[in-house]
Image: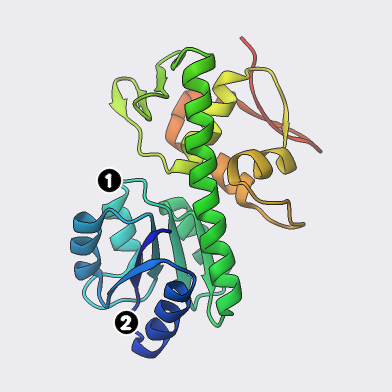
Amino acid sequence: MATILLVDDETNLADVIRRELQAAGHTVHHAADGEAALALHDALHPDVMILDWMLPRLDGLGVLRQIRQHAATPVLMLTARSEEIDRVMGLEVGADDYLTKPFSMRELLARVHAMLRRVELIQQTLQADRSTSTALLIRGPLVLDAEAHRADLDGELLDLSPTEFALLHLLLRNPGRAFSRAYLLDTVWGEDYISGDRSVDNAVLRLRKKLGPVGEEIETVWGVGYRLRAG
């Protein structure tokens, strides 16, 4: 199954999560503080990281910022913070999903498995693209290389999560085509649309910020979703 790095300083909760994940067939490694998490991440290159926000030595946001400098590991953040601004902050820093404490083990497992399916779908999509279309996509100063899984803006490497990369790849391959949020969730996220889910909107917001002027070409199609401006 998957190698998962669990980062939480609440020993009892971490033990419960580890048992549930191991029962589902995953290999689980645990870190109890931010600095240990960074060391384990670099050593293990996990498939998924479950990262608590409040940690000793270095908090979850600090861990996430450092990881996003060199890796696109899918990250599920755990937080006791319920305010929307806090959740949005985590997503903007680079988290792929979040859970607010307290939560059920069933929901945690479902979200982890959804993230794993999403990564698998992205890999399958990129494999298919390699055999059916040119790997290099260019939009002004933006160059996306699907084979290298790399995107550059003005010659500088863009820090994109796997979801952001897949979303950008889809838009670049289909300029002028409008995609509904439901379609994007199903194709890029690999999960059914849930009313009120802002995953697509938040991902587009992050992409626009990272792409600068090119990001302004991602247009909102009111009542539908998004498209990359044609031409």
Q: Residue at x 29, y 26 (%)?
A: 156
- Taking the image as shown, residue 189 lies to the left or right of residue 55, namely right
Above or below, comparing residue 222 to residue 134 in the picture: below
Picture coordinates of residue 113, whole percent (x, y): 54, 60
In this rendering, the label closer to the viewer, 2 or 1: 2
Image quarter (top left, top right, bottom left or bottom right) of the C terminus: top right
Along the line of sight, which residue is nearer the eye, 60 or 148?
A: 148
Choose the circle earlier in sequence order: 2 or 1.
2
- Quadrant, the N terminus: bottom left
Q: Residues within 10 Å of mark 1 (few under 14, many from 20)?
A: few
Left or right relative to 61: residue 116: right
Neighbor class of circle 2 (other Cα within 10 Å; few <14, some 14-19, many 20+) is some
| Pick the front one: 163 or 2 | 2
x, y percent for residue 108: 54, 71
Residue type for callout 2: Asp
Q: Which mark is residue 69?
A: 1
Residue 206 visible within the image? no
Disc 2, SS: loop
Residue at 25% from the left image edge and 66% from the top image edge: 37
Which residue matches tag 2? Answer: 9
SS under mark 1: loop
Q: Position of residue 138 (x, y in %)?
A: 45, 14
